[in-house]
Amino acid sequence: MPRLSTFERNGLVFDVTDAGPQDGVPVVLLHGFPQTSTSWVPVAELLNSQGFRTLAPDQRGYSPGALPSRRRDYRLSELVADAVALIDAAGAGPVHLVGHDWGAAVAWGVAAARPDLVRTLTAVSVPHPLAFVMAMATSSQALKSWYMLAFQLPVIPELLVRNNTGVAYRGLLSSGQTPANATRDLDQLHRLGGAKAALNWYRGMPFIRPAVLRRRIPVPTLQVWSDGDTAVGRRGHELSRRFVTGPWELRTLEGVSHWIPDEAPTELTELLTEHFAKHAADAPRSS
């Protein structure tokens, strides 16, 4: 099968970077906000060097051919269906599924809805969505997540990211991003005509139907949290264990910010390959 450079779903066209040996075990890498697949380049290169095939899409709101305008078009069920379409298009069978930030939320959804497509799940920085909600009620998570409410406002959030020296840029720096990576990520949003589509991931949250997420996760699950994360606390990761029936493990990276794939690609890749090897013989579960 030829390399994937794009895949389609419901009239939308998504860009994807397909790298590494084509006969390698496939690893799907899902990015978060406000990033694209470029955030996975260091990790992908390390995985490729170890014989894995990596598939890193620019998700809905980040691919030029996949910028629907309505908030409801960014509800989690649509994001999950996009990832499933990628796995199907790759024709690679069940995959190791890895997501960071919002990409982790999508990965949780895929593992819940289609565990038959998932060899292992790795959620980086963001816990199970229902555990995240529980953590907001039982810890300081609600204070850390103030921006999610702010992003529901019209127009104002877009104005905050209209240049690379304003509030959004300073916020990325304060959360641990390097100036170079913060500029990279904001530049990518500007090339897409602004941040509206990316912000719609947050604005689509009221349209989430939790029924699928109530399903327990039967696949081997690794959660990676970093103690320098200013956006997500540890409590939600600990609570996520309640939603996983398969093997589960939480690993903490010390002295690392929220931006784990950028900041600690070697450490993250070591955790990933250890997780993959540990569960190499586990068969995917049917949905």
Image (cartoon, rainbow, N blue to C red):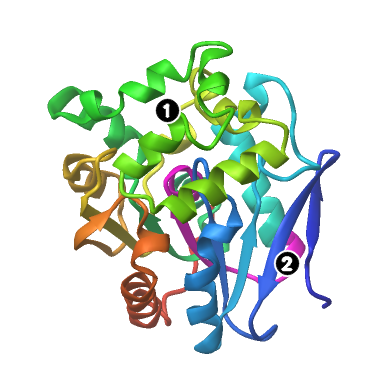
Q: Give me the residue at 26% from left, 45% from top.
A: 240
33 to the left or right of 229: right
Q: Single out the residue that lies furthest toward the top.
A: 154
Q: Give me the residue at 47% from left, 47% from top.
A: 182
253 to the left or right of 116: left
Residue type pointed to by label 2: Ala
**x then y, percent, for residue 140:** 15, 29
74 to the left or right of 165: right
Residue type pointed to by label 1: Val
Query: Any mark on residue 167, and which?
Result: 1
* Local secondary structure at mark 2: helix
Examine the image and state in which quarter residue 144 appears.
top left
Q: Which residue is mark 2?
A: 90
Would residue 79 be counted in the magenta stretch?
no
Examine the image and state in which quarter residue 51 appears.
bottom right
Q: Give me the residue at 47% from left, 42% from top.
A: 102
Would residue 105 be counted in the magenta stretch?
yes
Q: Single out the residue that lies furthest toward the left.
A: 139
Q: Is residue 92 above or below residue 254?
A: below
Q: Single out the residue that lies furthest toward the front.
A: 165
Query: Which stretch is magenta?
Result: 88-107
3D distance between C-alphas at marks 1 and 2: 39 Å
Packing grade of label 2 (10 A; few <14, some 14-19, many >=20) is: some
**x then y, percent, for residue 111:** 48, 52
Query: Which is nearer the N-term, disc 1 or disc 2?
Result: 2
